[in-house]
Image: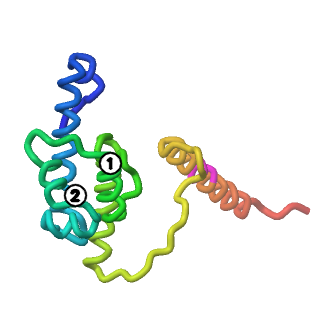
Amino acid sequence: MRQDPAVDEQDQSLDELVRSSKRQVAERLRYIRQHHPEGPFTLAALADRAGVSKRTLAQAESAEGANVTLETLMKVSHSLGIRRIAYFLDEAVFRQVNAELDTLALLQEQKVEGVAARMAAPVGLPPASVEQLAQLLSGIVANAEHVRTALQELPPTQ
């Protein structure tokens, strides 16, 4: 996969961008078919699961890719439990979904039957801000403990 698509795209013609995007979709289709936690899937098995033809998938996965339709990509992604169609075109979404699927596979291997989900951070706060807030609160708690200890060592007032 390309490291910095924004830089590459500035230097590419429209035809090159189309070819590059087709290859990217083809690579990601092959990847998810082979690495999905419920797979690996043959072309026929995935085609059957998604309700598309094996030929369509084979063409989409070919070295040069094919003009796969948005409908086909949505059928494939939804049949695999991927609700973000950007999986096939956006590097960040591709990595995030794969990380989620890897976690799911690990949980399945460990025979986890259920997971209670909760928010790890308030909505809208970036992880760096959450970390800073956690450090600040830890410092406040530590200082409060020192003050409490110091106050307990003072002689009683009369």
Residue located beneath label 1 in the image: 87
Crowding at dot 2, Cα within 10 Å, few <14 / some 14-19 / many 20+, comes out as many
Relative placement, left or right, of 43 versus 127 is left
Q: Position of residue 41 (x, y in %)?
A: 16, 67
Q: Secondary structure at mark 2?
A: helix
Outermost residue on the right side: it is 158
Residue 40 in view, yes or no: no
Check if residue 115 falls in the magenta segment: no
Residue type at mark 1: give it. Answer: Tyr
Residue located beneath label 2 in the image: 32
Mark identifier at residue 153:
none
Quarter holding the C terminus is bottom right
Relative placement, left or right, of 79 versus 44 is right
Q: Position of residue 84 (x, y in %)?
A: 40, 51
Q: Is residue 7 above or below residue 41?
A: above
Mark 2 in CB contact with mark 1 (< 8 angstroms): yes
- Residue drawn at the location 29% of the way across and 49% of the way down: 95
Q: Position of residue 105 (x, y in %)?
A: 27, 70
Crowding at dot 1, Cα within 10 Å, few <14 / some 14-19 / many 20+, comes out as many
- Residue drawn at the location 28% of the way across and 65% of the way down: 51
In this picture, which residue range is highlighted in magenta?
136-140
Residue type at mark 2: give it. Answer: Ile
